[in-house]
Image (tube, rainbow, N blue to C red):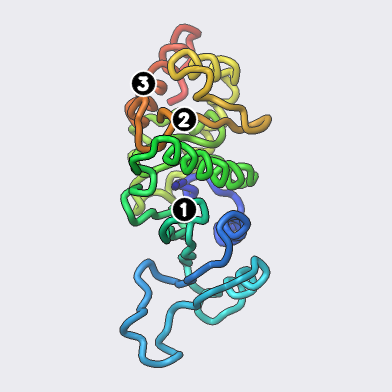
Amino acid sequence: MFTFWGSYLEEPYKEVGIEIAKTLMKHWGAVKLLSRSRVPNLVSAKTEEERNYIENIETPEALEEIIRNHRLFKNSSMFVAGYFNSAVTDDKHWVDLVVSFEYMHMIEYDRLKFYRTKDPELNAARTAALLEVLKDIARLPAVRELWMGDRWNGFLGEPAFLYRPRKLYDRVQDGSETLKTKEEVLSLVKRFEEHVPREWVLGYLRRRLGEDAVEELDAKKIVVKFYDGTITKEKVRGWHFIQAFTKDVDAYLAERGLKLM
């Protein structure tokens, strides 16, 4: 799961990150490890002052208090919260939520092995459980795009964020450029919403992916699955589909004498 929110977020990113971390606690329980680094000094720290992490945070209220006020986090530009995915009961499936200025990323360290078992029904059930978690995150008003899986396996968010011209979005997806693109991204999203009807987008997606692959999450956001049943089984390659969609939007607009970029 990831979003390049440095290119669109209008709220303080850490506030949104706290809400996402609390949402994950509703599904997965305690934060097992909270750090200000993706590589906490678990082994090297010899004293309390050297530790850059806190273990076993049991409640959302405690998590929020620590991130806001603890010496390790209140002035840090990043926090990383580690969880066990409770949908996996036969082993410990560790997942890290990484929150920074440029992006929010959920890292799954086992190369999706818990979605690649020999039991197709189990794989599908775990994928469905993950999707429900992501839907809760996508429902947060500040989160305008959310991508499922590291291979763009699914999308949750506002349809305008499916339109990704390479000229702009190569910069969005470059961490050193992400924050510099916000004005351009927000302007492009506004123009898309003015000129591309939501119903046209939904019809396009359903014709190419099937009715069951597209869901309206709320009045603004949609869910699009580029996978077939389980996250590890591609129906289409997400990034290729997004590029085709972008070209077809351009063609749709060109027929009407319009251009977004």
Q: Please tell me whether residue 35 is drawn above or below residue 205 in the rendered image.
A: below
Residue at (44% x, 53% y) in the render: 106
86 relative to 234 in the view: left or right: right
Q: Secondary structure at mark 3?
A: helix
Q: Please tell me whether residue 3 is drawn above or below residue 35 in the rendered image.
A: above
- Which of the 4 image quadrants contains residue 28? bottom right
Mark 3 or mark 2: whose residue is earlier in sequence: 2
Disc 2 marks which amino acid? Lys
From mark 3 to mark 1, how far is it between C-alphas?
A: 35 Å
Q: Which mark is residue 225?
A: 2
Mark 2 or mark 1: whose residue is earlier in sequence: 1
- Quadrant, the C terminus: top left
How busy is the neighbourhood of tag 1: few (under 14 within 10 Å), some, or many (20 plus)? some
Disc 1 marks which amino acid? Val
From mark 2 to mark 1, how far is it between C-alphas?
A: 21 Å
Disc 3 marks which amino acid? Ala
Residue 65 appears anywhere in the view: yes
Where is residue 222 drawn, in percent x and y? 57, 30
Residue at (46% x, 7% y) in the render: 255
- Which of the 4 image quadrants contains residue 197? top right
Residue at (59% x, 75% y) in the render: 66
* Residue at image mark 1: 88
Where is residue 148 drawn, in percent x and y? 44, 41
Where is residue 67 drawn, in percent x and y? 57, 71
* Residue at image mark 3: 244
Where is residue 111 drawn, in percent x and y? 31, 50
